[in-house]
Image: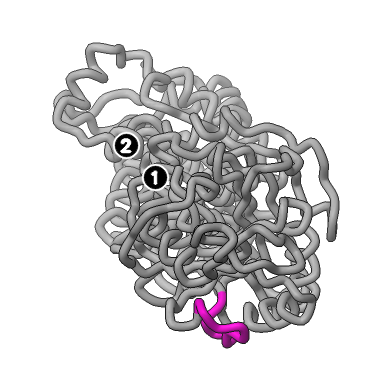
Amino acid sequence: MPVSKSNQINEIIRCGKDPVHFTNKYLKITHAERGLIGFDTFPFQDDCLNAFVEHRFNIVLKSRQLGLSTITAAFAIWRAIFYKEKNILVIATKLAVAQNFVKKVKVMLANLPSWLLIPEITSSTKTTIEFSNGSKIQAIPTSDDAGRSEALSLLIIDEAAFIRNFEELWTGLYPTVSTGGSVIILSTPNGVGNQYHRLWADAEEGRSDFNSIRLPWYVHPERDDAWFEKETRQMKKKMIAQELMCDFTSSGDTFLTAEDLDRIRTGCRHPIEMSGPSQGVWIWKYAIPGKNYVLSADVARGDASDFSTIQVFCTEDSEQVCEFKGKIPPDQFGNLIYEIATKYNGALVCPENNTYGFATITRLKEMGYSNLHVNDKKFLHSMDIPIGKIGFNTNGSTRGPILTNLEIYLRNSSIRINSNRLVDELRTFIWSGNTPKAQKGYNDDLVIAAAIACDLFDPNGKNENSTINVYQAMLNATAKVNNQNNGQLIPYSNQNNPLKPVGYSPQGMDSGNINPSFAWLFR
C-alpha cells in the first residue's frame, strides 16, 4: 500500500530517532533457508541497538551465531543515511569477512523503500559504499595501519580477540575516534591477557568508558538445553567455552582450567597483616615454633615492569603463609628476605640467581645468612660458596619441570594457596607452545616464586630429586660426625638458625639411614 507524503515524513523522523523501529519495519536480510525476509529482531538485539545509541563506547562479548554482525550492519546503515558526514569503518579479521559485511549492507539498502533512502548512493565497491550526504561505510581487513589516517564517526571491530597485534592496532585506532567518534568492539573470547580481554575486564569493572554487553548462547530465545546438547556433542571443552559460553579462561591455553582457578580462588583469604614496602608483604600465618619453612624469591631490577616477589611455605602443612610483591632494589630486597626468613624460624632461602639475584644473594651473605639453597653438590662442603652456586636458575631446562610440578600440585590441591594476587597471575599464565609464561602485558613473578618454593619441599612427597635423595644428600654433605653422639648426623650450625641445614642440591644422590631428628625433611 502506498504511503502518503505526510506518513512518509513522520516515518522518516521516527526512523531517524529510533534504530530499532527502522530495523524491524524496513530492513530485510537474507536467510540461509528462507531467502529474503524482514529483519525481525530479538529482544537482545534491540537492546544492543539501543546501547549503541546510548553509549559512545561499547564492547560486546558474544556467543557465535547471534546475528551481531548483521545488527551492526543495520546500525551502520542507520547512522549513514540519517546523519550527514558519518565516516564508518569496519575492521574484520580478513578480506572475505569485510566483503561479506558490505554485502549485507547492500542487501538492506537495495530493499529499502525509495522514499526512505534519502541520500543517493554515489559509489559502491566490494568494500565501500558512499552516499550523497557525505557519509561512507567501509569494511577492510586487518593491517598494521588499518584506519590510522581516518577521522572516524563510528569504528566497528569484529572478532577483536582474534586480530593479530590488536594491542598495537588499537593504540593506532583510538586517536581516530578521540574527537567524538563511537566504537563497537565485538568478539567471542580467545583466552585471557590479550588486548580484547583487557578492554573487556576494564569495562566490566568500571575502569574505562566502555559499556560492556555479555551475550552467551542462551540469550537467543530459540535456543534451549536440547539445542545446546546437540550443538556441543562434537565440540571440545575449549571450543564450547569460546564459541558459546563467553568464558575467557577456558577458551585459551591457560596453565590451569577455569574450574581449578575458581576452586583455588575460593580458598583464598585476606591476610592477617599487610606490611613492608608499599604494604606488599602479606601474612596469613605467623611462624610457629618447631615448624619449618622455605622462602623462595624471584628477583627483578626494581624499577621496570617486573616485580620482585617472595613466597613462604610451611613444609609440614604445604601452606602458603607469607608473600611479597613489589618494586625494590635488589640489595634492599636482600634485607627484606633476611627479615622475613629470620621471622620464619630461619627458613631455607632460595632466590632466583639471575643477574639481579646476584646482588640479593651477595647482600644475604654480607648479613651472615647461611641457610641458603646450594644448587651444585660440589660446593655443599664449602664454607665459601660462589654466588653463582646459590639459589635457583630458571633460565634453562629447570623452568619447565618446576612449573609442570606446580600445575600438578595446584590441580591436586597438594598445596594451599591463600593469595588472590597469585591467582590473578595464574589466570593470565598460559602455554605458548610448550612454554608456560605470562600473557603479554602481564606478570608471572609470583608464579615463578611459588614454583621454586614447591620444588624445595615437594608437597606430594613423591619427587625423589626434591625430597628424600636431595635432603639426604644435603645432610650427608653438611653433617659432621660427633663422637659423643654415637656418630649421628648433626647439621652444620649457623648463627641464624643453629639447627637448620645450610642448603641442598637439586641433583639426585644416594640415600642412607636418616636420623629421626630430621624426619621433617622426609614428609
Residue at image location 37% in from the left, 48% down from the top: 252
Instruction: Return the x and y of residue 421 as percentages of the image width and height.
Output: 64, 47
Secondary structure of the residue carrying tag 2 is: helix
The mark nearer the N terminus, 1 or 2, is 2
Q: Is residue 112 left or right of residue 355?
A: left
Secondary structure of the residue carrying tag 1 is: loop
Residue at image location 54% in from the left, 85% down from the top: 388
Q: Within 10 angstroms of label 1, few (less than 14), some, or many (20 or more) residues?
A: some
Q: Nearer the viewer, residue 127 or 516?
A: 516
The residue where tag 1 is placed is: 461
The tally of labels here is 2
Residue at image location 56% in from the left, 33% down from the top: 265
Q: Quadrant of residue 294?
A: bottom right
Q: Nearer the viewer, residue 26 or 20?
A: 20
Q: Within 10 angstroms of label 2, few (less than 14), some, or many (20 or more) residues?
A: many
**Viewer-side label of 1, 2:** 1
Q: Nearer the viewer, residue 418 or 414?
A: 414
Q: Which residues are magenta?
A: 380-390
Q: Is residue 351 left or right of residue 413?
A: right
Q: Is residue 371 above or below residue 258?
A: below
The residue where tag 2 is placed is: 243
Q: Amino acid at mark 1?
A: Gly
The N terminus lies in which quarter of the figure?
top left
| Residue 179: mark in rendering | none
Q: Amino acid at mark 2?
A: Glu
For the residues bearing labels 1 and 2, Cβ distance under 8 angstroms: no
Q: Is residue 79 above or below residue 213?
A: below
Residue at image location 57% in from the left, 61% down from the top: 490
- Answer whether residue 4 is magenta in the image: no
Q: Is residue 127 visible?
A: no
Q: Is residue 483 left or right of residue 141?
A: right
